[in-house]
Amino acid sequence: DAGITQSPRHKVTETGTPVTLRCHQTENHRYMYWYRQDPGHGLRLIHYSYGVKDTDKGEVSDGYSVSRSKTEDFLLTLESATSSQTSVYFCAISERTGANQPQHFGDGTRLSIL
Amino acid sequence: SQQGEEDPQALSIQEGENATMNCSYKTSINNLQWYRQNSGRGLVHLILIRSNEREKHSGRLRVTLDTSKKSSSLLITASRAADTASYFCATDARSSGAGSYQLTFGKGTKLSVIP
């Protein structure tokens, strides 16, 4: 298994509070991704990074920000959490970009916002 | 927007039977990938098929791709209880950022293999 660690694995918080999820990789892969997975929607890309301090928006980026100060860490922040952001969040990595590159996933963070 | 759509949404079979899942997509692709997700875990890459390939095998997995119909199928032969999982297809799209590619996932097929 690819060395990807997501933390925390579970979190319950209240509406309006800030939340930061962490993805840590030991593979030295350049590309990192944050997805959310919701029933009826599958996986949707939130943000991705193509290098240290290089990030871009995905399909559902509103309400989320990211940072990547080191190759191994990719942080996802909900500045002011809302109930619609209750979801399971997955981090993924890939060694290179390109249409023929598989992505490797962490085991997810289950986030509940009350 | 969802690019790939799997069919059926759920499938229940007996151990030893074959399982077939289908994926349809809307726009041209370079490659199509299939992933498996066990309950409570992340997705695991199974197989990639390029747009110029029609069929690919990997162990008990057989993937076909019909670009004229914009569809793919995943066949798992001689299924086992351990194959119980959700299966997703993913198609690629070039993004505007730094020439990188994004994957767009379907909603998945939930496969249950009954011992």
Image (tube, rainbow, N blue to C red):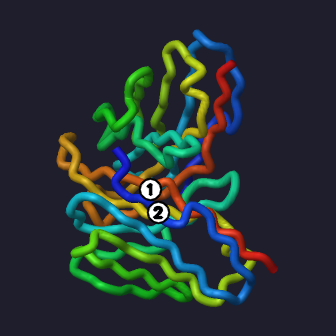
Q: Position of residue B86 (x, y in %)?
A: 60, 62
Q: Position of residue B32 (x, y in %)?
A: 34, 68
Label 1 sits on what residue type? Gly
Q: Which residue is mark 2?
A: B6
- Please report the residue visible at 53 percent of the width from the left and 79 percent of the height from the top: B20
Could you tell me if the residues under marks 2 and 1 are in contact, i.e. CB atoms within 8 Å? yes
Q: Secondary structure at mark 2?
A: strand
Question: Image height check: is A29 above or below A100?
Answer: above
- Please report the residue visible at 49 percent of the width from the left and 24 percent of the height from the top: A77
> In the image shown, does B15 or A81 lie closer to the viewer?
B15
Label 2 sits on what residue type? Glu
Q: How many marks?
A: 2
Question: Image height check: is B5 above or below B2?
Answer: below
Q: Is residue A97 left or right of residue A27?
A: left
> Is residue A1 visible to the viewer in this orientation of the structure?
no
- Please report the residue visible at 27 percent of the width from the left and 58 percent of the height from the top: B26
Q: Position of residue B18 (x, y in %)?
A: 61, 86
- Please report the residue visible at 39 percent of the width from the left and 33 percent of the height from the top: A60
**Circle on res. B53:** none
Q: Quadrant of residue A65?
A: top left
CA separation in Å, label 2 and label 1: 6 Å
Task: Decide: few, some or many residues near mark 2? Use Cα within 10 Å; few <14, some 14-19, many ≥20.
Answer: many
Q: Quadrant of residue B28?
A: bottom left
Q: Which residue is mark 1?
A: B106
> In the image shown, does B22 or A53 lie closer to the viewer?
B22
Q: Quadrant of residue B72?
A: bottom left
Subunit bearing disc 2: B
Q: Is residue B81 left or right of residue B52?
A: right
Task: Decide: few, some or many residues near mark 1? Use Cα within 10 Å; few <14, some 14-19, many ≥20.
Answer: many
Give the mark, 2 or 1, whose residue is nearer the N terminus: 2
